[in-house]
Amino acid sequence: MKIVVAPQAFKGSLGAFQVCDAVRDGIRQVFPQAEVIISPMADGGDGTLEVLVKGTGGTTYSSQVTGPLGEPVEAMWGVLGDGRTAVIEMARASGLALVPGDRQDPLITTTRGTGELIRHALDAGYREFILGVGGSATCDGGAGVAQALGIRLLDDRGRDLPPGGAALARLDKIDMSAMSPLLSNSRFQVATDVTNPLCGPEGTAAIYGPQKGATPTIVQELDQALVHYASVIKRELGTDPRDASGAGAAGGLAFGMKVFLNAELKPGVDVVAEAIDFAARLRGADLVITGEGQIDGQTSYGKTIMGVASRAAGLGIPVLALAGSLAPEYKSIYDRGVTSVMSITPRPMALDLAIGNAYQLVAEATERAMRMIDLGRTM
């Protein structure tokens, strides 16, 4: 029996590699001779750097850059095992986890540090880039990245805009003349974990602004600033991808990457699957086990489980999905290639207890699933 184990991280408890180890332990309790292929996954959000770099035998580096509040932070980035492709997880430089709760303010937070990571990789000789864009603290439309790479965003008096999304309302001119010449022959893939546009009721400010500290008034201010930003870009540069799928990812960072760096926006799970050659790992498999922290209504829209399930279903391979919790609408994934779903919690328990015992819970849930499979084989 060949089993491919392809979960993403269980946010707040286990990284993707740890989940894989726990699942393998559970499998071994029932099928000790099974061939277990470990293939951690990610969708552009939390854990993408580790999955891509470690999963391909690559290398990680650390650089000091500007954090989301303008203070210096030490941020990891990496290079794939091919030795050519730099991997940047924007949350390492511009993520919400870097901002204390009482200082969250998407009016002023910046993606400059992410742009500085790109610049470090450019200076090191890399021209192929994968950028994971989940977990941002920002809503600046990628303006900070642009400024870090030499692009000047100017108000009507010729002054450089300060950091943050609110300042975009004052944008009047864009000066590309000092943009890093190293970008001219560079290629960027942006691994998005959402499909939202830049602006409007489904846009980045409206949907994700509140989790970054935005009140309803701030959401409105940010959305209007982003509309103005996109309009000036259309006038100055002749491009307007504000409604592109995923343009609103990471507070509009994906939009900015597409505008200024001609980046390709792709579902993160597709980027990861291609980078690690997931298709090759699936060949000849009898079962695929995937999972994430919570399966809910959003799972069906481009998340890791769906990316894994669609590839497995195309080969006729059954898929078991494990989750820390199941929202009422979880059954929608049965129509998307998932064969069975199992919660790792066998009884009601406090969240902190579940998080603290996540490894054991995953292993035991896997063992239960394997015993059910063994029962079916016996019958």
Image (tube, rainbow, N blue to C red):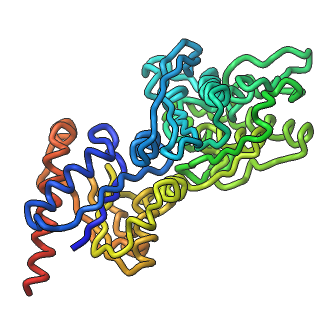
Q: Nearer the viewer, residue 367 or 354?
A: 367
Percent x, y for residue 15? 32, 42
Can residue 200 be seen here? no
Percent x, y for residue 101? 43, 22
Can residue 262 be seen here? yes
Percent x, y for residue 120? 62, 25
Pick out the residue farthest to the bottom. 379
Q: Nearer the viewer, residue 50 or 267?
A: 50
Percent x, y for residue 172? 88, 27
Instruction: State whether residue 371 is above or below residue 208.
Output: below
Q: Nearer the viewer, residue 228 or 233?
A: 233
In the image, what residue occupies the spot 18% across and 45% down?
359
Instruction: State whether residue 32 is above or below residue 239.
Output: below
What is the total number of numbered labels drawn onto the structure image?
A: 0
In the image, what residue occupies the spot 13% across and 47% down?
360
In the image, what residue occupies the spot 38% across and 65% down?
281
